[in-house]
Image (spheres, rainbow, N blue to C red):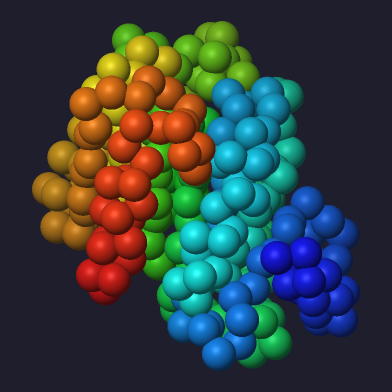
């Protein structure tokens, strides 16, 4: 993996142009050339919009995807700190960069997904539901995502850190992904544990319902236990099942 990271860093330094400053916060991991399928995923780690769980919700996922021929770009996005547009811009710029440099990176520009965990899941679903065609992902992978900004069942820390304590109902609706789904929203897979008391699984249930009603292909997995924040950690009781479910979903399209 270290050799691949070095190779990716060298490749990135060679093909960066207008986005060189923007993408200093992106780490790219490419699969071996003979394994590459052209698919890529931009990963947004969680952290409540105050910090980033970069490893188990970010870079630790690279081997799983690279082994399946999928390129990975982990975004160390900017914390909002009063400006909700900052993390969104970082995630969209990563997608834009991959598309504009698809040939050099051996990536199919029409097969780039976005993945996020917890608050990173909110960021991922926000990009999926708000972005224009230029930066809209082709699929989304969401782990125990914050979806809604409805104060009655959001993760209030993510809500406050992104929008402030009193953003008003109009702003809360705008950044509630379940209320922003259209027929153009990309297909999704959503994962939770039933006993998650940090981000209520109804965040994902309502998002799935909205996707289903818009006739967007979607899958929802809720495991019996595990709480919140397990990411790629192998001590999550259902880690093997989750990886199998994710692998099968990735092969379904």
- In the image, 15 versus 191, the foreground residue is 191
Q: Is residue 229 left or right of residue 106?
A: left
Give me the residue at 71% from left, 32% from top.
79
The correct choice, above or below, for 100 with respect to 208 in the image is below
Residue 177: % across, % down: 36, 38
Dividing the picture into quarters, in which one does residue 235 lie? top left
Residue 238: % across, % down: 31, 37
Work out whether residue 186 can be spotted.
no
Q: How many marks?
A: 0
Work out whether residue 75 can be spotted.
yes
Residue 211: % across, % down: 21, 48
Residue 111: % across, % down: 44, 75
- In the image, 215 versus 226, the foreground residue is 226
The correct choice, above or below, for 114 with respect to 202 in the image is below
- In the image, 139 versus 191, the foreground residue is 191
Dividing the picture into quarters, in which one does residue 205 lie? top left
Q: Is residue 178 left or right of residue 171?
A: left
The correct choice, above or below, for 247 with respect to 31 in the image is above
The correct choice, above or below, for 98 with respect to 78 in the image is below
Give me the residue at 22% from left, 26% from top.
224
Give me the residue at 30% from left, 27% from top.
193
Q: Quadrant of the C terminus?
A: bottom left
Q: Is residue 9 left or right of residue 39?
A: right
- In the image, 73 versus 208, the foreground residue is 73
Give me the residue at 49% from left, 43% from top.
232
Q: Quadrant of the N terminus?
A: bottom right
């Amino acid at each position: 993996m270290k050799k691949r990271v070095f190779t990716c860093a060298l490749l990135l330094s060679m093909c960066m142009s207008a986005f060189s400053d923007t993408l200093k916060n992106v780490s790219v991991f490419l699969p071996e050339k003979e394994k590459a399928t052209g698919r890529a995923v931009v990963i947004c780690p969680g952290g409540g919009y105050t910090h980033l769980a970069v490893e188990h919700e970010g870079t630790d996922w690279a081997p799983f995807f690279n082994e399946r021929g999928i390129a990975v770009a982990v975004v160390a996005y900017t914390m909002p700190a009063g400006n909700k547009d900052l993390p969104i811009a970082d995630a969209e710029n990563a997608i834009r960069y991959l598309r504009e440099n698809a040939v050099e990176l051996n990536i199919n520009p029409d097969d780039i997904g976005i993945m996020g965990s917890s608050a990173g899941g909110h960021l991922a679903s926000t990009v999926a539901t708000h972005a224009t065609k230029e930066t809209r992902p082709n699929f989304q992978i969401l782990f125990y995502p914050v979806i809604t900004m409805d104060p009655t069942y959001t993760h209030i820390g993510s809500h406050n850190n992104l929008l402030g304590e009193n953003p008003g109902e109009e702003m809360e609706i705008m950044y509630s992904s379940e209320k922003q789904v259209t027929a153009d929203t990309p297909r999704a897979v959503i994962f939770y544990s039933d006993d998650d008391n940090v981000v209520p699984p109804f965040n994902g249930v309502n998002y799935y319902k909205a996707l289903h009603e818009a006739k967007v292909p979607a899958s929802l997995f809720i495991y019996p236990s595990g709480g919140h924040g397990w990411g790629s950690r192998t001590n999550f009781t259902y880690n093997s099942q989750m990886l199998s479910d994710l692998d099968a979903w990735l092969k379904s399209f």
